[in-house]
């Protein structure tokens, strides 16, 4: 199989990191040799996703050192001995373990999707370790209530529908996983998802297909186990967030509704809200634009630290 150019030329490398509870998680960075003379971000990625969901951050030429990890039991990371150790608190502990392993003092935390939960939890509970939060297509709190945003459903109704569907998929996932693992994935599959409105047009369909194939290596039942477990979280008080925040939303996002993200931005001091034309995968659809926003936010945080 010929890898897409973006994958073949990437500088992404992986290493194992031991979390506090003994679970081995798979961490990665785009700068294994430490040659980037620029800021560092800790990426709290979407649930079960991989580096290939971030086309603008795969090479040292992006000017940003990225450190991230794969969620427990997904894409090469071990499952914990106890399946109950899969809450948002455990994800935050994994983030701290990765930060310690890569000797990150106080980076900007970049969150996408459910990773925005982790980013806000770190900023609230460990403010000395976080200098800013850049959130893409995600909200802190119960993510199920923010889903189906373009349908304008009330939050309780959206939560009921999506949580019920997730419970069904958790129970039946073992029947679906063998079928999902045999899907013929490629640019045509991405085009089909685009026609269905699940993802917008992407500049690199081959890279998007690799990201999708990697995502589908996680068993369906385990994915929805994680989704349901991480939704059972205590609310983070937005008043506890003291660092600069930028939230980037897609106006056609079915997973994290733009209006929910705008409401969060209104409740956070020093927050900026940007809405782009796109879906939940806005960083894949408009990689250059999202990267530009990230760089401007990093400059803003650096200026704040200087003054």
Image: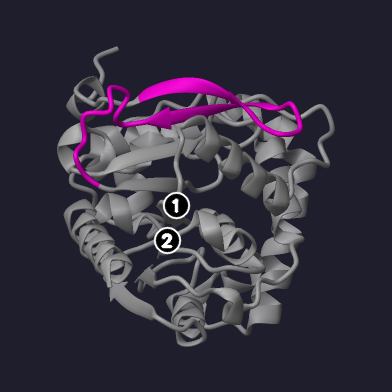
Element at label 1:
loop
- Left or right position of 135 against 222: left
Labelled disc at residue 131? 2
Of mark 1 and mark 2, the one earlier in the sequence is 1
**Residue sitting at x 70%, y 57%:** 165
Residue 25 in picture, x, y percent from top left = 60, 28
Element at label 2:
loop
Crowding at dot 2, Cα within 10 Å, few <14 / some 14-19 / many 20+, comes out as many
Above or below 30: residue 90: below
Above or below 68: residue 295: below
Please identify the quarter of the rendering in which residue 13 is found: top left
**Residue sitting at x 54%, y 36%:** 100
- Left or right position of 58 against 49: left
Q: Nearer the viewer, residue 291 or 7?
A: 291
Residue 85 in picture, x, y percent from top left = 79, 40
Residue 118 part of the magenta-drawn span: no
Crowding at dot 1, Cα within 10 Å, few <14 / some 14-19 / many 20+, comes out as some
Spatial CA distance of label 1 from label 2 is: 6 Å
Picture quarter with the N terminus: top left
Picture quarter with the C terminus: bottom left
Residue 114 in picture, x, y percent from top left = 55, 56
Q: Nearer the viewer, residue 46 or 160?
A: 46
Q: Nearer the viewer, residue 201 or 43?
A: 43
CB within 8 Å, label 1 to label 2: yes
Q: How is the image coloured?
A: one colour
Residue 31 in picture, x, y percent from top left = 29, 29
Q: Which residue is mark 1?
A: 106
Q: What segment carries the magenta color?
A: 13-38
Residue 189 visible here? no
């Amino acid at each position: 199989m010929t890898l897409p150019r973006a994958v073949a030329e990437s500088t992404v490398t992986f290493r194992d990191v031991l979390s506090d509870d003994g679970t081995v998680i798979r961490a990665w960075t785009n700068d294994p040799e430490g040659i980037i003379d620029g800021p560092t971000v800790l990426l709290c990625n979407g649930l079960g996703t991989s580096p290939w969901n971030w086309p603008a951050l795969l090479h040292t030429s992006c000017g940003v050192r990225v450190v991230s990890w794969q969620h427990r039991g997904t894409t090469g990371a071990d499952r914990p001995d106890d399946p109950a150790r899969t809450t948002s608190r455990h994800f935050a502990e994994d983030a701290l373990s990765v930060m310690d392993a890569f000797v990150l003092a106080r980076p900007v935390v970049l969150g996408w999707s459910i990773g925005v939960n982790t980013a806000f939890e770190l900023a609230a509970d460990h403010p000395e370790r976080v200098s800013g939060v850049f959130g893409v297509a995600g909200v802190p709190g119960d993510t199920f209530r923010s889903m189906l945003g373009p349908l304008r459903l009330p939050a309780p109704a959206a939560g009921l529908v999506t949580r019920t569907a997730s419970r069904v998929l958790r129970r039946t996932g073992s029947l679906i996983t063998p079928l999902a693992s045999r899907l013929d994935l490629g640019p045509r599959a991405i085009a089909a998802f685009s026609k269905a409105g699940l993802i917008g047009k992407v500049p690199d369909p081959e890279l998007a297909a690799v990201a999708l194939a990697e995502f589908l290596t996680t068993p369906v039942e385990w994915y929805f186990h994680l989704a349901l477990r991480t939704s059972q979280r205590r609310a983070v008080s937005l008043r506890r967030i003291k660092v600069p925040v930028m939230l980037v939303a897609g106006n056609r996002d079915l997973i994290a509704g733009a209006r929910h993200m705008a409401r969060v931005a209104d409740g956070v001091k020093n927050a900026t809200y940007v809405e782009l034309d796109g879906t939940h995968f806005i960083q894949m659809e408009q990689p250059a634009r999202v990267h530009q926003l990230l760089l401007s936010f990093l400059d803003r945080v650096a200026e704040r630290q200087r003054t």
